[in-house]
Image (tube, helix red, strand yellow):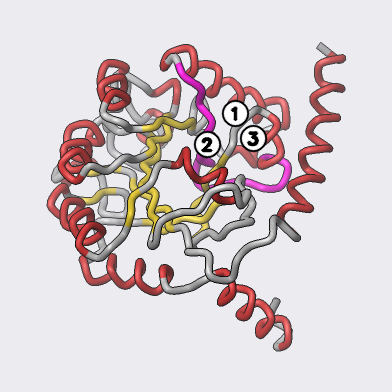
Amino acid sequence: MRSFWWAFGFVLVLVAAWLFCFGRAGYSSSEKAPALIILMYHKVTPDPHSGGLGLRVSPASFAAQMRYLRDHGYTVISMNEVPDFLRGKKSLPPKPVVITFDDGYRDNYRYALPVLKAFGYTATVYLVAHAVGGYNFFDANRGVQPRNEMLTWEEIREMQAAGITFGAHTLDHPSLISLSPEEALSQIRGAKEFLEEKLGCPVVHFSYPYGDFNSEVAAIVAAAGYKTAVTDTPGVNYRGANPFTLKRIRVTGKHALWRFAYELERHGKETAGDLQERRKVAKRKGNF
């Protein structure tokens, strides 16, 4: 066991060094490269007893948002296309959007999937592995959210067949920065292995529970064999971005359609060149 941790520690140091360099420089990017928008959802349900509007979007609002994407020229792509885009190996269509759901609530199957299928859209659902077929023990047991049913394996396989991608959200949804490296690895790698066995396919996308991560946790995720990891840091992503600290735009039930449109438009118009220019201005002002 000790030899394993020495070997893993060595790999972790190498990955951490790579992440550091990636975050500072990254791959060369075109100033005209589009901003990649990743939308962050949790629950899609009309039931007010399932929780507040911070995590819940009504099916009607979700359908209106998907319709807005279609009617205003956005192209929904798979998270599987993102790694090659970030490395400069793949071009994306104008106004690319990735749709993601955290936790794996059962309402994703009942209410979100029919809407996604109607528009021909894919999405990525990040599963809390030990919650599948059960309930949201990670929040309900602490009294911070009502008890919600989670997706079953049968529903997950049906969603897979419909083109939905599944990623990992750890085994038990802990705050990873509060764990030891050994515990964090167990949650991160354990979820990948468990889900791959159940789903019969590689699981290469990850979401940090509660959005909690640091450079050490990101390095563990990379060393465990994932290709991307999403955060809850607001913003969009450009070619050359660190694949293990991807930004998202959170969508809540508090967002009227105009607010949803505003968030998309203001971020979508920005290019990598715009971001570089803003950084230069902030640095001159001493704010960067």
Q: Are marks 3 and 2 in contact (CB under 8 Å)?
A: yes
- 10 Å crowding of disc 3: few (<14), some (14-19), many (20+): many
> Tag 1: residue type?
Ile
Q: Is residue 104 magenta?
A: no
The reply to whether discs 1 and 3 touch (Cβ–Cβ < 8 Å) is yes
Residue 210 image point, x, y percent = 49, 45
Region in magenta: 201-217
The tag earlier along the polypeptide, 2 or 1, is 1
Please state which amino acid type lies under the numbered disc 2.
Phe
Distance from the alpha carbon under mark 1 to that under mark 3: 7 Å
Disc 2: CA contacts within 10 A as few (<14), some (14-19) or many (>=20) = many
According to the image, label 2 marks what residue?
Answer: 206
- Who's the residue at 87% across and 22% down the image? 6
Residue that label 1 marks: 188
Does dot 1 land on a helix, a strand or a loop? helix
Please determine whether, in this image, residue 183 is positioned above or below residue 208: above
- In the rendered image, the residue lying farthest to the bottom is 285
